[in-house]
Amino acid sequence: MSRAELTQRDQDFTVPSIEQLRTGNRSTEVSAGGHGHMPVTVATMSTSATEFPVTVRVFSQRLICSPRGARWARVLTRDHLRDWEVPHDPAERAEQVVAELASNAVRHARVPGRGFKLRLKLDRVAGVMRVEVTDARGERLPAVPHQDMDGESGRGLLLVVALADRWGWEPYAPSGKTVWAEIDLQTLPTRA
């Protein structure tokens, strides 16, 4: 078969959409083109069977190491947490933490030609939202500042400490680091 015939055959072949696969039909006929090819039957599972809820969701995106990249990190976080139906308070806290960590990556860990990575992980079973920002400067470790609170900058990690239930950092090979923060989806009532 010539290259042109292969290309035409590939263009004629249609794959069922996700919606077609979710219709509940036991099978879906898929056209394989009009060049003497037979239709293909794709077996699908019935949706009437018990479906298990999604308990873990993960999103990861590389972003440019600039103020625009930091803004996009916050917007992507807000949009994904809204789509994942995370409750308002933990979502708002996670969005602010991402804004601070992304801003720190841009301000303190910029390497020409290298970006930073945003990763969000929602674990509904554990009841935890984890946010991670990975940058290329492993030698510049995060530290909570002990400076005058009247300064114009330097309070980003103080906000992370205040908003997150847990936070820390870990090395990222070959020379970077990942700063992470975890936010509990439900806060336990405190005893009086």
Image (spheres, rainbow, N blue to C red):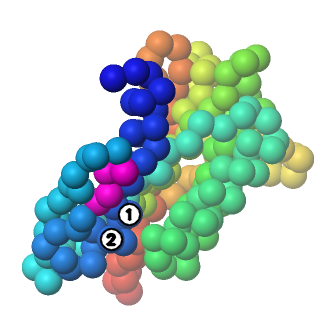
- Mark 1 element type: loop
Q: Is 69 a magenta residue?
A: no
Point 59% across, 59% down: residue: 77
The answer to which quarter of the image holds residue 23 is bottom left
Q: Is residue 9 left or right of residue 37?
A: right
Residue 4, compared with residue 120, is above or below; it is above
Q: Is residue 24 left or right of residue 67?
A: left
**Furthest residue to the front?**
36
Q: Which residue is mark 2?
A: 20
If the image is split into quadrants, where does the N terminus sit? Answer: top left
Residue 180 in sight here = no
* Residue 126 on image: x %, y %: 26, 64
Choose between 38 and 190: the one closer to the eye.
38
Residue 172 in sight here = yes
Residue 163, compared with residue 19, is above or below; it is above
Point 13% across, 73% down: residue: 26
* Residue 90 on image: x %, y %: 51, 71
Determine whether label 2 and label 1 are within 8 Å by CB: yes
- Mark 2 element type: helix
Residue 101, compared with residue 29, is above or below; it is above
* Residue 118 on image: x %, y %: 56, 43
Q: For residue 134, which numbered disc appears in the image?
A: none
Q: Which residue is mark 1?
A: 17
Give the residues drawn in magenta, as a range.
Answer: 30-34
The amino acid on which the numbered mark 1 sits, given as a three-letter code, is Ser
Mark 1 surroundings within 10 Å by alpha-carbon count, few (fewer than 14), some (14 through 19), many (20 or more): few
Point 40% across, 21% down: residue: 2
* Residue 147 on image: x %, y %: 76, 40
The amino acid on which the numbered mark 2 sits, given as a three-letter code, is Gln
If the image is split into quadrants, where does the C terminus sit? Answer: bottom left
Point 29% across, 60% down: residue: 30
Q: CA distance from mark 2 to mark 1?
A: 5 Å
